[in-house]
Image (cartoon, rainbow, N blue to C red):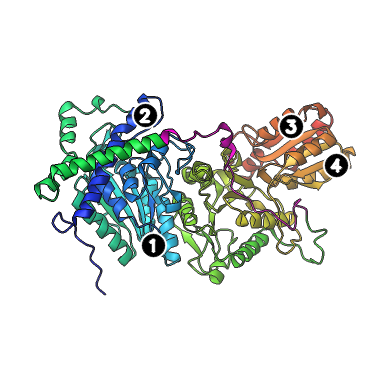
Amino acid sequence: MLMKVAKRYTIKNTDKETLKQWYSLLSLGRKIDDRAPNYLKQAIGWSYHAPYAGHDGIQLAIGQVFELGKDHLFPYYRDMLTCLSAGLSPEELILNGISKATDLASGGRHMSNHFAKPEWNIHNVSSCTGNHTLHAVGVAKAMKYYKHEGVAISSQGESSVSEGYCYEAINGASNKKLPVIFVFQDNGYGISVPKWEQTANEMVADNFSGFKNLRIIHCDGKDIFDSMNAMAEARAHALEKEEPVIVHAMCVRMHSHSNSDKHELYRDEAERAEAAAQDPLPAFRKQLLDAKIFTKKELDAIDEQAQKELLDAHKASMKAPNPSPESIYDFVDAKPYVSTKYPEGLPSGDAEGIQEEMKFIDALNGTLKAEFRHNPDTFIWGQDMANKDKGGIFNVSKGMQIEFGYDRVHSAPIAEDYILGTANGFSRFKEDAHVVVEGAEFADYFWPAMEQFVECTHDYWRSNGAFAPNLTVRLASGGYIGGGLYHSQNIESSLAPLPGCRIVVPAFADDAAGLLRTCMRSKGLSVFLEPKALYNAKQAMAKVPEDFEVPFGKCRVRREGTDLTVLTYGNTVHHCLEAAEKIAADLGKSVEVVDLRSIKPLDEEGILKSVNKTNRCLVVHEDKVFAGFGGELVALINEKAFESLDAPVRRVGSENTPVGFNRILEKAVLPNADKVYQGMKDLLEY
């Protein structure tokens, strides 16, 4: 089968109407580009502007090749002409620049120069350079799965390719043969850092020359026709071969990196003059005049029309409303699934009709499979979690690949950023799609994914409600398995301060099933922390009703009491229950054990109800006491239940040291039933 050859553009074979459209876009875009800094000087806005002048050819080409309704475009902060060429209006660009409430990209929430139009799949991307490459790969992965004819286009500067997740993205795209076009707009500088300090190769695209299933196209990003030919060829190749393409476009940065940068400090006058002399706009104008396609009068008329469009857009934008202060609370959290069976999160009586108790791990495995049957647009991937009948290190996903197939259940490279970033991108393609990821084999190894995780947490807010990544991040957390430094961490205190994510930590099989189901049926981002010591633990077994559901933000009283409230979650729930029984036997005191289950959102009402009843409170968790999540619980009680207290709120948790591998060291670091008992006793005797 012969590959379709993309049209080759030359000044002779391109019709006058097309050339007129291109010149109009180039003229209008440059006028907006030049005007943008004036908004800041006039204190109107556009406090961040990265001029694109010198990138004109490649940016015009990206926008012209982009096909609405088929493609997904991920522009970076210098891509103003790209977005204008793709169809955004001058008014839409200016609304973003001056951060108005009607800005399509974010309603003024994201910094200026981050242009987007979500309804057209022109995506709102991060300020972290190159971050969106993974999202583009994720979208392309979905395109391939759903047999959608289109490409994902990711655009960035050459210096951002130094980021590790760019290599992860390109490696993943070439491995899976995905229709992605990675555009590197090379202007020689990463702010003030010259290219030679970024990479040994003069052309950063050449760093990937050994990658299989990857086409690399070089072009002059200043030249309109060379850029158009490169992008048209790249799109045709990506569609025909279903494999990624890098377009490396040589550009020139005519101005400073942005309006907060002064290139006079690191570029001498001769270099600046040379850059200005390479201006693509007058060069294209000269081409049109020399070829006698347009007269000077005709081009002047186009320039005048562009100036009028700019002024009209400016006037309309100035009338647009500013965002209201109250709107900061909108779109922080996406819509959670609301249980109709168990709205209060209570078990169904005594799990009537159920004879056998289920292990924690079997509850997880059974729920994953049930939800995959319930929603055919559900997927799971992660490290070492799907190979025939094997289902991860702990076999939580055992048998899933056999039942649901490789496309829905598969392992991923050992690249945490890639795992989470591509899941984010995949969920952008289809609103009903939900991706479960094993974010790392152990929670301890999740840190490389943190930048992508942060993106996920504020995607919904940053896009003003246009997009929320429908993801459940599963992480095996905690100690008590002799895992040492890198297999024993609890990370909830690091994740909880980030708005836009839910965090749950079940301690029993029934809650594991119910909370996982709720996570997988909810919009937005959920973190499901699995205390791995409980996977096969007898004390975590429970009767699990069919299709059991547990809502977010509802604690569960695991043991009623009147003399002391213990707030806990995860592994330490069982230590607290054991210690409470011993307290009753030794001291005749009644301890109420409250299993929080949901860290975020938190059941403030349930917590305060218990504390107001017992008038004493002990907070117990596995994580370190210092800066652990328990500090937030103590603050809540001091703020809202202080007058009910007969004693200070105290905490029991890990020592402020790493977790030792030797079992003697592990025991010395982590909390246990004896330490909890002593904490209860001290507080009861206060």
Q: Secondary structure at mark 2?
A: helix
Which residue position is annotated with label 1? 176
Apparent side of residue 424 relative to residue 330 in the rendered image (left or right): left
Main secondary-structure element of the magenta-colored stretch = loop
Q: In the picture, residue 242 is in which quadrant?
A: bottom left
Marks 2/4: CA–CA distance:
64 Å
Q: Secondary structure at mark 4?
A: loop
* Disc 1 versus disc 2: nearer the observer: 2
- What amino acid is found at the position of numbered circle 4 in the picture? Gly
Q: Is residue 218 visible?
A: no
Residue 419 falls within the magenta-colored stretch: no
Q: Quadrant of the C terminus?
A: top right
Marks 1/3: CA–CA distance:
51 Å
Q: Secondary structure at mark 1?
A: helix
Residue segment shown in magenta: 317-346
Work out whether residue 651 or residue 305 is closer to the camera in this orientation and state it.
305
Mark 4 neighbour density, 10 Å: few (under 14) some (14–19) many (20 or more): many
Work out whether residue 493 or residue 102 is closer to the camera in this orientation and state it.
102
Picture layout, residue 676 above or below residue 246: above
Which residue position is annotated with label 3? 637
Lower sequence index among marks 4 and 1: 1
